[in-house]
Image (cartoon, rainbow, N blue to C red):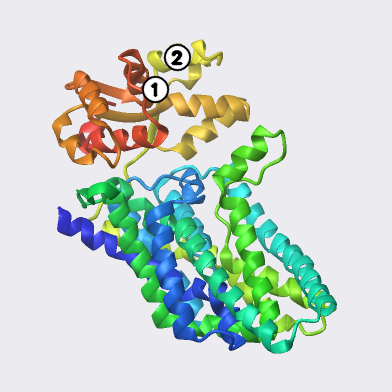
Amino acid sequence: LIMLILLFLSSGLFLGWSLGANDASNIFGAAVSTRMVKFRTAALIASIFVIIGAVVSGSGASHTLGELGSVNMIAGAFMVALAAGLTVLLMTRLGIPVSASQAIVGAIIGWNFFSGTLTDWTTLIKITAAWVAGPLLAAIFAYLLYRTLTRFTHTVGIHLFRLDAYTRVGLLLITAFGAYALGANNIANVMGVFVPVTPFRPFSLGSMGEFTGIHQLFLLGGIAIAVGIFTYSKRVIQTVGKDLLRLTPQAALVVVLAESLVLFLFASRNLHDWLIASGLPAFPLVPISSSQAVVGAVLGIGFAHGGRNIRLKVLGRIAFGWITTPALALALTFVTLFFLQNVFDQQVYYPVRYRVDAAVTQRLTSAGVAVKDDLSGNYENGRLFIRRLRSAGYGIDDRRVIMEYAELLPVKIQAVELLQSKVGDWFTEQQISQISALSGRQFKYKWQLEEELVAIGIELSGAQMEYLYRYFRLPIHEAQGLR
C-alpha cells in the first residue's frame, strides 16, 4: 500500500518540479536578466528559501482550491496533479509564464466533470477575479514604487556604483523573501491533495519539536520545486526578464517587490483578520498567480516609461497562455481519468450521492427549510440533484443547506487504534480516546457524525472532520448497500 501511495505521490513531485521550472522567473528572473545576480547564486538562494517556506509556513492561501471540488480518491489526486504538471511543463517549454494554480484549477474542474461533482462557482469566480486583480495591483504597485524610487535617487544623488551595490543587495534579499512566499503559498497546490494519505510517520527533533508526516510531505514538495528551479527555469526567465520589456536593475528590484506585496496581501491570514477586526475591507485569501503578478509588475514599469517599450506581441502570447492553461489542464485531466479508470481499472473518484429521506427532512425542517414531498428519493450525483432543486424552485441559499444535509457519506467508526499514528499530525491523544467511544457506530450523513461528536464533547476542526470522513469512509460496495 505504501509503495502504491509513493507511486501516486510522484505526480505531485512532478508538479512541484514543473512549478519550480516555471515560477522561478517570478522570483529572480528580472535580477538574472539584468545581470545583477548570477543565475546559480539566485537559484541557490531561491531553492533554500522555497524549501523553508514550504516546510515552515505550509499551505498558505491555497486551501481555497479545495472548495472547488474535493478530490476524494488517491488515484484521482495522482491524475489531477499529473495533468496540471504536464500542462505547466508544456507552457514552460514554450517559454510562457503560467501558474500552477491555474493548472490545478483547470485539473480540479476536469475531475469534477468526470466524477459528476459540483463545481463551486462562487469560489471559482473569487479565484478568477483574483487572477485579474493580482496583475492590476502589481502594475499599480510597480508604477508607484518605480516613480518613487527614481525620484528619490535623483534627489539624493547616489553614485552609480553605490546604487548598483544597494540594488544587488536588495535583489538578493527580495529573492529570498519571494522564494519563501512561493514555497509557503504554493506547496499545497503541489502536495495538498496527498496530505490525508501521507505515508510518513512523525519523528522527534528533540527540543525543536516533532517533524510530522505533513512536514515531510511538504519537504519533498519543496525539494521538487527547488530541483525545477535549478534544472529548467532559464527559458521562462528570458520571456519575463527580457522579451516582454528590457529592465534596468532598479526596475527589476521594483518588479520583484511589487509581486511579493501582492502575494502577501492575498495570502496573509494575520493581515486579513486584522483588517476584518478593524472594520476594514480585506483581501480574500485566495491563491494568486505569481506569474500573472510579475507580468503585471513589468507592465507597471512599462507604463511608468509611457508604455512605449512594451512588446505587445509577447504580452499577447503570455495572455494566450493564461487562457489556455486551465482549459488544457481540464481537458487533459478528463481524458486521462477515463484511461486510468477504464484501461488500468483504478477507482479515480468516490461517488458522492444524495438522499432525501425522513431523517434529512426532519433535520432540514429544524434548520428552517421546508422540504417538498416530491423531493424525496436518491440522486446519483450533485449535478442531478442541483437540477432537481432548481426545478423545484429552491433559492440558492436553500439549495446549499439541502445539499449539505442530503449528502450521503457512509462512515463506520472502527480500528480507532490505528489513528494513533496520526497523533501530532491530526489529533491529540485525548481526541483519539474520545473518538474510541463511538467504535462500531455507523453513520450515513456528515451531520449525523458531527452531532454525535458534539454530544459526547469532542471539538474538532473542519480539517480534522474531513480526515475522519476519509479515514472511516466505507468502501464503495458497502456504501452502495445502504441505499
285 or 178: which is nearer to us? 178
Residue at x-position 83% and y-position 74%: 151
Residue under pointer 1? 447
> Measured along the vertical axis of the image, is residue 404 above or below residue 185?
above
User: Is residue 245 found left or right of 10 in the rendered image?
Assistant: right
Residue 144 screen position, x and y as percent: 79, 66
What label sits on residue 146 in the rendered view? none
Which amino acid, mark 1?
Answer: Trp
Within the image, what quadrant is residue 31 found in? bottom right
Q: Which element type, helix, strand or loop, lies under badge 2?
A: helix
Label 1: how many Cα within 10 Å (few below 14, some 14–19, many 20+): some
81 or 480: which is nearer to us? 81
3 or 350: which is nearer to us? 3
User: Is residue 234 found left or right of 142 in the rendered image?
Assistant: left
Residue at x-position 18% and y-position 36%: 420
Q: Is residue 32 visible?
A: yes
Comparing labels 2 and 1, the label whose residue is closer to the camera: 1
Q: Are marks 2 and 1 in contact (CB under 8 Å)?
A: yes
What distance separates the C-alpha of mark 2 from that of mark 1? 9 Å
Mark closest to the chain's N terminus, 2 or 1: 2
Q: Quadrant of the C terminus?
A: top left
Residue 422 screen position, x and y as percent: 23, 40
Within the image, what quadrant is residue 355 found in? top left
User: Is residue 395 found left or right of 68 in the rendered image?
Assistant: right
What label sits on residue 363 in the rendered view? 2
Q: Is residue 240 visible?
A: no
Which amino acid, mark 2?
Answer: Arg
Residue at x-position 44% and y-position 51%: 59
Residue 314 screen position, x and y as percent: 67, 82
Residue 82 screen position, x and y as percent: 36, 65
Q: Which element type, helix, strand or loop, lies under badge 1?
A: helix
